[in-house]
Amino acid sequence: MNTGIIFDLDGTLWDATQNITNSWNDTVQKKGYNLNLTRECVSKEMGKIMEDVADSLFPMIEIPERYDLLKECLKDENEYLAKNGGNLYNGVVSVFQKLIKKYQVFIVSNGQLDYIKTFIKYFGFEKYISDYEEAGRTGRPKADNIKLVMKRNHLDKAFYVGDTLGDMIATEEAGIPFIHASYGFGTVPADRLKINDITELPELIDRLVENKNNEKISTYG
């Protein structure tokens, strides 16, 4: 059976919020706006589609100017992160090393074009990630991009690991099991599968794959 583990990025594999905030503030000020974004307000936007982020952060700016500003922020962000990266969660490398022995590993994010590529190249993760997809490349919602990755890679079974309610909803729309990364940015209903630390994931995946009778699997915490 061809099984894939599909990851969200922000709040699941790394936290680049501070560097994203720094980059966006540089762009906003370069464009002449008297605004100063905080890490807290930017972190609340993680996982949203780009138009919703712009509406939330820049409501005082008229449409379509606010969308143009965010596009400029995102373009500059990729360049900033390519040089400065973000905070990779402890255990990600060892988890990837364990998972690829049995499964394929993927990333699907709502980020801009080349956001995932920037992450992969910064950490040298080409040897772990079989494929990825992002809203900035397809213009499609996360559920569709999950399905694209599954179809493109001929997956018989897949799991999505993410940290927000939006991730959960998209995963359920895609028709595959969702695993909540509870250490991330968001919350989901308490009855969902979850991990409190990414290092718990390989064992949980093995248990889920081996559970041929579809028995309820208890998770950590």
Image (cartoon, rainbow, N blue to C red):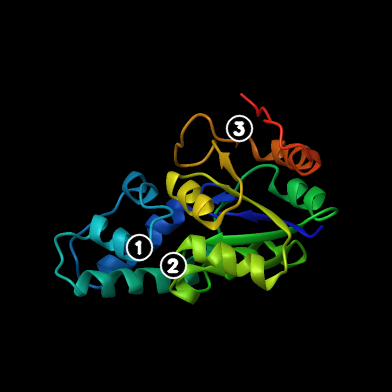
Q: Amino acid at mark 2?
A: Glu
Provide the residue designation for mark 3.
196
Give the residue at x 38% y 62%: 49
Q: Is residue 35 left or right of residue 109?
A: left
Q: Are marks 3 and 1 in contact (CB under 8 Å)?
A: no
**Residue at the top extreme?**
221
Tag shown at residue 48: none
Q: Amino acid at mark 3?
A: Asn
Give the residue at x 26% y 66%: 29
Q: Nearer the viewer, residue 47 or 16?
A: 47
Q: Secondary structure at mark 2?
A: helix
Q: Earlier in the sequence, mark 2 or mark 3?
A: 2
Tag shown at residue 77: 2
Locate the N terminus and report the quarter of the image it occupies. Answer: bottom right
Q: Nearer the viewer, residue 209 or 81?
A: 209
Provide the residue designation for mark 1.
24
